[in-house]
Amino acid sequence: MHRQTMHRRSFLAGCGCCSALALTGCTTTGTGEGNATPGYRPSAATDEGGLWQVMDRTESELKRSRALVRDEAVNTYLRDIVCRMTADHCADIRVYVVRTPVFNASMAPNGMMQVYSGLLLRTRNEAQLAAVLGHEIGHYLRKHSLQKWRDARAKADFGAFLSLGLALAGIPAVGSLTQMALLASIFSYSRDQEREADDIGIQLMAKAGYAPGEAARVWEQLVAEKKAMAEEAERNVFFASHPEPEERQAILKAKATGLAQPGQTDGAEPYRRNLRGLRRTLFEDELRMRQFPRTLVLLDQLCSDIPPDADIMHFYGEVHRLRAENGDLGRARGWYERSLATPDAPPEAWRGLGLVLRQQGERGPSAEAFQRYLSLAPRAADRDLIQSYIALGS
């Protein structure tokens, strides 16, 4: 039997509490070893206490960041999901949604959880989101970040390491993917720790009433995106520091079989309802990445769950218009027209159609589309530019 397997089994066996959240009920020595316990805070004189102080300062900076999503309803919704899975630790965990269009979340040892907006675009229901959040909670409960901190400190000059840690600790708040990669190279978990966090996460979500099979479906999306962006995936810190998505998908699918119970839900409807107001912002941030093959795979995946709505059709049009390869303008025009045929089409679909018509030389229809856009969005930030296009078209 492999040492890691033995370690994991002994950990689970040692958590045999009668609570539904048995994984959070294990005791700790109070010296920074073992599992996190509710209300725990290390002594400032310990190395763990020093790590918490770094993260406390980072959290203070994060609270002031312009990159934070401050939608109270969205933040409350995510916090409720976390509390549903870890009732005893609810008061110890703070959830922050950061506008960074990549699939990721992180959990600091002091209870600061960051959820990147790109994750919310890729999880298609509440159960899938719970699987990812449960994974991060697993890192927190097992104090993986403390283990990595000690390991990194032992392998590097402490002064230089601490300076780098302090300089980079707040990186996700400012959205610098390059600097975030540097930080991840220091604080990335081992693959065994990632597997352990997966194990804890799927158990937490199942005990909270979520369908455990949805944990594997999260990775179907990432596998498809990875294939669409093979070169990018090779440079991606997330893939470099985590087990292969195909491996995680297979393991989680097998684990779900033993955890499935009647009455578990995927929570698709409340997920779409609670994130509806944020959805267009998520799509717009995704488009700014200019990774069109990946975005098209994402849209295709979303359409496999629900029929394409006005927003999805509009963003299909945006991808094709911006990519502008052979036949893309015609495809973009078709998607904009499909979006505009629905009662809840975004005003920006008229702008997109106007831009395509202008590129196709149809200046009159283009000006008409632009006029419709400005009538629906009179305070649009690009109003002056669009008015100049209208003048040229007429």
Image: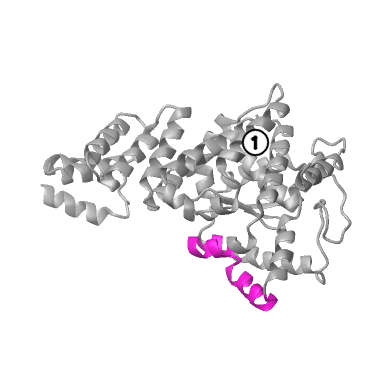
Q: Residue at x 86, y 61 (%)?
A: 31
Q: Residue at x 83, y 53 (%)?
A: 34
Work out which residue is located at the far top of the displayed protein and give it.
262
Report whether 289 appears left or right of 268.
left
Q: What residue did someone put label 1 on?
A: 251
- SS assignment for the magenta stretch, majority: helix
Q: Would residue 27 be visible to someone looking at this image?
A: yes
The span picked out in magenta is 157-183
Q: How is the image coloured?
A: one colour
Where residue 99 sits in the image (x, y, percent)? 50, 54
Q: Position of residue 299 (x, y in %)?
A: 41, 37
Query: Is residue 212 visible to the viewer in this orientation of the structure?
Result: no
- Quarter of the image with the N terminus in it: top right
Residue 180 is inside the magenta segment: yes
Q: Amino acid at mark 1?
A: Ile
**Residue at image coords 72%, 29%:** 259
Q: Is residue 95 above or below residue 41?
A: above
Left or right of residue 123: residue 203:
right
- In front of the other: 58 or 140: 140
